Image: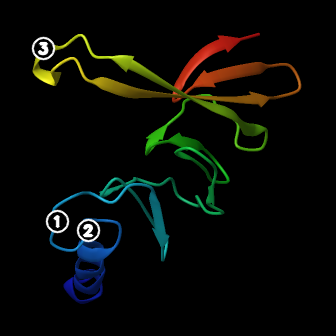
Amino acid sequence: MGAGPSTPEVKERQHFGSVYGNTGKIRPGYYIKNGIVVYGGKQIELLPGETNFQKLMYGYLKSNFRVFYKGQHIPHSNPATFTVLNRNNVSTLSKFPEKNNQFEKLNSVLAMDFEANKKRIYLGANLIHEE
């Protein structure tokens, strides 16, 4: 690749999935365009031949090869059988003085995948049960 073809791609990424106008806040969610996948303003490194991206609920994304949670690859997950179960929102008092004991929202998302001989359950990107 020469300098010519890569220059427009870099300029495009400055706006694609990066920040809200002049607020400086990073855009949430996945952005997929021309074979580039971005989450939280960061480009995800893809495997050769990785395609067929499908946005799932609550921060999950799957391709033909892998599953991601909030931009992080989930090892050993199977995109063919992966499904999101539910999301629980819990409010709790913060125990950190710098947060002035304010209520803080904690999200927990359950997902699973079933293969012929394996069952895995995930909390976010973390494997919490396997049988």
Q: Nearer the viewer, mark 2 or mark 3?
A: 3
Q: Residues within 10 Å of mark 3 (few under 14, many from 20)?
A: few
Q: Residue furthest left?
A: 98
Which of the labelled discs sits on residue 97, or is there none? 3
Element on which disc 2 rests: loop
Disc 2 marks a residue whose amino acid type is Tyr
Query: 88 or 103: nearer the eye?
Result: 103
The disc, 2 or 3, on the residue closer to the chain's N-terminal end is 2
Look at mark 1 in the image and give the residue it sits on.
23
State which quarter of the image contains the N terminus.
bottom left
Q: Residues at badges 2 and 1 in contact (C-beta under 8 Å)?
A: yes
Q: From the viewer's perspective, is 2 left or right of 44?
A: left
State which quarter of the image contains the C terminus.
top right
On the image, the x and y values in percent for residue 44 come to 40, 53
Q: Residues within 10 Å of mark 2 (few under 14, many from 20)?
A: few
Quadrant location of residue 13? bottom left
Element on which disc 3 rests: helix
Q: Nearer the viewer, mark 3 or mark 1?
A: 3
Which of the labelled discs sits on residue 6, or is there none? none
Query: 107 or 52: nearer the eye?
Result: 107
Calculate the distance from the C-alpha at mark 3 to the C-alpha at mark 1: 28 Å
Look at mark 2 in the image and give the residue it sits on.
20
The disc, 3 or 1, on the residue closer to the chain's N-terminal end is 1
